[in-house]
């Protein structure tokens, strides 16, 4: 895991678990999905009480260093020193020979826990970690999928429970939207027919920029409340996008129907059945949320433009001459 270290690390003093959660959830998911840009990494520091956040490059906590939370979005991580909170590696390998006092989460990469290393919380990985004899893990070892199934149950039963609950939530939200906003259906149908390209572009922008903006707001004093509220609302906003995508898909599949409810139910049945397929369901949720947010944005923009555009004024009548 050696290599040249890039300079200009992104660091921020969060000061609490909410800010750390915002950094992990917002920045990590967004920037990894987008793909990392030029290397922006870290500088050595011996001072404690700091979070270490690296966009891309290498995260190295030297033996003499102590940091708060440590997050790297794209690249390997090596911990020889001490991480007082959580270590999160989104896209890269992790090697731990020092101490992580809370959880270690590695979403896409190999994990090696050396002899003498200590993890005070859980070890959450996608692949099977290599844990040498003499290493200490005080929490549980779990898979990423199992961990983010909200620990409802293990294996297939938990996923079925979540599928049923989320399907019911999408159905209820969709029916309420169509009942109280009947104009949404024709606007979404129009956007899904004639604005596919623009809706995809708007969707990707909103999906990724919303959490980025929330994290940036957390850095400022005056923006902390709004940043927290936006982060808390992300799950609802993404689900709203997914519901709008269901409407858009149904309008495309059932082009002849004039019933907004029939079109919605058609799209709902198709997407929720496909969601039962492992891995495919997750990607369809992501793509659906992106497309739905874009459809909603395009529909709102076109509706607003239609309302604000001044109707053409009739020409004044020609004067009638007196004979």
Image: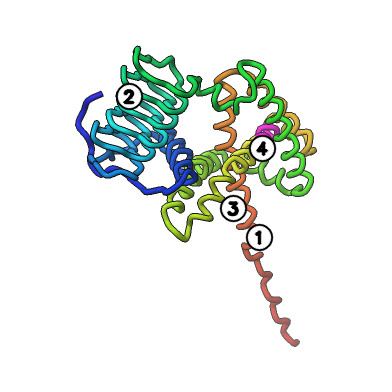
Q: Is residue 250 magenta?
A: yes
Residue range highlighted in magenta: 246-252
Q: Position of residue 195 (x, y in %)?
A: 58, 42
Q: Earlier in the sequence, mark 3 or mark 4?
A: 4
Q: Earlier in the sequence, mark 2 or mark 3?
A: 2
Give the CA distance from mark 1 to mark 2: 59 Å
Give the CA distance from mark 3 to mark 4: 19 Å
Q: Is residue 267 visible?
A: no
Instruction: Tell me the tag on residue 301.
Output: 3
The quadrant of the image that shows the N terminus is top left
Q: How is the image coloured?
A: rainbow
Q: For marks 1 and 2, give the one nearer the viewer.
A: 2
Residues under numbered marks 2 and 3 in contact, where contact means CB atoms less than 8 Å apart:
no
What residue sits right under mark 2 in the picture? 96
Residue 91 lies in quadrant: top left
Residues under numbered marks 1 and 2 in contact, where contact means CB atoms less than 8 Å apart:
no
What residue sits right under mark 1 in the picture? 307
Q: Earlier in the sequence, mark 2 or mark 4?
A: 2
Label 4 Cα neighbours within 10 Å, binned few <14 / some 14-19 / many ≥20 = many
Label 2 Cα neighbours within 10 Å, binned few <14 / some 14-19 / many ≥20 = many
Please report the residue visible at 69 percent of the width from the left and 23 percent of the height from the top.
161
Residues under numbered marks 3 and 4 in contact, where contact means CB atoms less than 8 Å apart:
no
């Amino acid at each position: 895991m050696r290599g040249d270290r890039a300079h200009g690390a992104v660091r921020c003093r969060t000061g609490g678990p909410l800010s750390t959660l915002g950094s992990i959830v917002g920045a990590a998911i967004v920037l990894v999905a987008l793909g990392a840009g030029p290397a922006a990494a870290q500088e050595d520091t011996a001072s404690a009480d700091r979070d270490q956040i690296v966009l891309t490059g290498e995260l190295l906590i030297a033996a003499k260093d102590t940091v708060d939370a440590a997050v790297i979005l794209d690249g390997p991580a090596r911990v020889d020193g001490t991480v007082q909170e959580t270590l999160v590696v989104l896209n890269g390998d992790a090697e731990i020979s020092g101490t992580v006092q809370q959880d270690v989460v590695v979403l896409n990469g190999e994990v090696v826990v050396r002899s003498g290393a200590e993890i005070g919380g859980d070890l959450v990985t996608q692949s099977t970690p290599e844990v040498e004899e003499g290493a200490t893990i005080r929490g549980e070892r779990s898979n990423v999928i199992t961990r983010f199934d909200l620990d409802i149950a293990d294996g297939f039963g938990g996923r079925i429970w979540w599928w049923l609950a989320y399907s019911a939530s999408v159905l209820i939200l969709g029916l309420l939207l169509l009942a109280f906003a009947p104009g949404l259906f024709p606007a979404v149908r129009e956007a899904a027919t004639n604005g596919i390209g623009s809706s995809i572009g708007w969707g990707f922008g909103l999906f990724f920029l919303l959490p980025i903006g929330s994290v940036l707001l957390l850095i400022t004093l005056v923006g902390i409340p709004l940043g927290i509220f936006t982060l808390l609302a992300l799950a609802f906003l993404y689900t709203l996008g997914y519901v709008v995508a269901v409407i858009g898909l149904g309008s495309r599949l059932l082009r002849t129907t004039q019933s907004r409810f029939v079109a919605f139910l058609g799209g709902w049945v198709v997407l929720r059945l496909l969601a039962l397929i492992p891995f495919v369901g997750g990607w369809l949720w992501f793509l659906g949320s992106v497309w739905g947010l874009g459809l909603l944005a395009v529909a709102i923009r076109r509706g607003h433009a239609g309302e604000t555009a001044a109707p053409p004024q009739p020409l004044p009548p020609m004067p009638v001459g007196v004979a």
